[in-house]
Image (cartoon, rainbow, N blue to C red):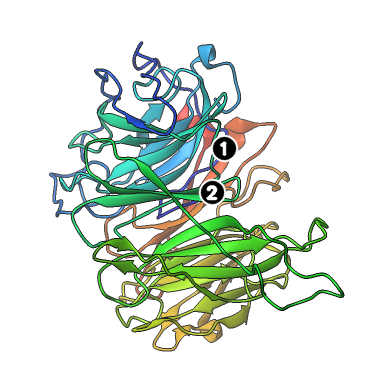
Amino acid sequence: MIAVGVALTAGLAAAAPLADDQGSKAAPGTWSTPGTAAPLRPVLPARPATFTKPAKHADFNGDGYGDIVVPGPGWGKDPSRGLSFVEVVYGSPAGLTPSRRQSIGPSTSGIPGTAYGAQMGAAADFDRDGYADLALESVEDGGSSVVIFYGSATGLSGRSIALKGPGDFSFDTLAVGDFDGTAGTDVVVTGKGECWVFRDITTKPVPGTKIPVTGRIGAKIRRGSVGPGSVAAARAPVVADVNGDRRSDLVLVVATPAADGEEGEDFWNAELRLGTVNGLSTKAVGFGNDQVSERPAPVAGDVDGDGRTDVIVTGPETGTITAFLGTAGGLAPGKQIRLPFTGEVKRLAVGDTDGDGKADLAAFNAYTATAVLPGGRGGLDLARAQRFDKATPGLPAAPGNDLRGFADMASLTDVNGDGKADLIVEAPQENAPDQDRVFILPGSDSGVTIKGATAFSGAALR
């Protein structure tokens, strides 16, 4: 549910009406540009724009502070109620400021008229104007669309483009990158076992291309007497420059169902396609046999500071991750790490929490435990790991005992502009949305810290 530093979660706020235009409907398999779009409510920058081109990651108004996205309560509801699908909360010197936000809902221009929700954000500066832009999945009757809202000096604007997949195609993961190293940004989506790439997006529509996946088809492996079947399914993408050539590369986690069709007997691995001057290589290199799983989605960051991006995937055993370090030739063999908490890993996030130039990893389980593993010269450093949970002294208290949704949203994003990523995690209360909490633990010279930890409630976004 999290992609490229933009955090998404559920059930927080209601949207004021923004526009009467319901957005034009794209023909299947094509991009469309909606009609004249009314801008969203302006959000002035917290300081004069200090943007660079391309934009600082997830900074939609160019003021140097990272912003986050949280879905509102409109998911699956009657669109005529006007409830927001997502809320964009803007950063400031004091961190996240709930009063400085924008609502995107069914009445927002660019959102298709049949939409009943939006999820999965990815931030990128598509038009290279110094303001980050937001790509969302619009979930609709009969499929889904990618909707890109463009940033501006007053936050996300009414300018947008949208993609409708072929037929009833819908997707469940989204990532962005630049596979040929040119000025255009590429979007990757996966759904129903398929992977599609839309290349060199700036301000106009582009067609999509289906990417084949091979998984472990034909591999001479067995579980008992059963081997892999004849169809492989793309499950989760992550974009990373693993060889340091300034072109994005694509890693897909792939499941190859067993030949006898028994559920839960998939043969897992991952595939790497390097970026080239012509876009993604047609050659896929398989790796990570039985070392990866699909959930949560994999993440990428330079955890050893060598200028190449590393890929971290949930491991096959409960409470483990597998780290694949980038090298000049691709990815090194995976290293399995057991996290300092029990239970399944629910979400992963990467960011530089101490400003040392190396990415750190935050891992969350379903029982309010969070582990932060700092990056180091050899990769993730388990010996220096931090662990937080609901009993950690100094943390703002959760309002209730319903913690089933803990870490539905989680992110490492620099929301106060100090150059260090802050840990942001949500603890929703399913039957009491006003009591939802979003916790912010600041980054510091020593990593994530309790000092200065804050929280805001769902009621603050109403």
Viewer-nearest residue: 260 or 340? 260
Which quarter of the picture shows residue 416? bottom left
Q: Is residue 301 left or right of residue 362?
A: left
Q: Is residue 58 visible?
A: no
Residue 101: image x %, image y %?
Answer: 35, 33
Label 1: element kind: loop
Viewer-nearest residue: 438 or 392? 438
Residue 15: image x %, image y %?
Answer: 44, 22
Tell me the residue that label 2 is attached to: 409
Which quarter of the picture shows residue 232? bottom right
- Residue for point 57% across, 56% down: 234
Tell me the residue that label 1 is attached to: 10
For badge 2, the amino acid type reads Met
- Residue for point 17% across, 44% down: 47
Q: Are marks 1 and 2 in contact (CB under 8 Å)?
A: yes
Q: Is residue 270 visible?
A: yes
- Residue for point 73% across, 46% down: 401
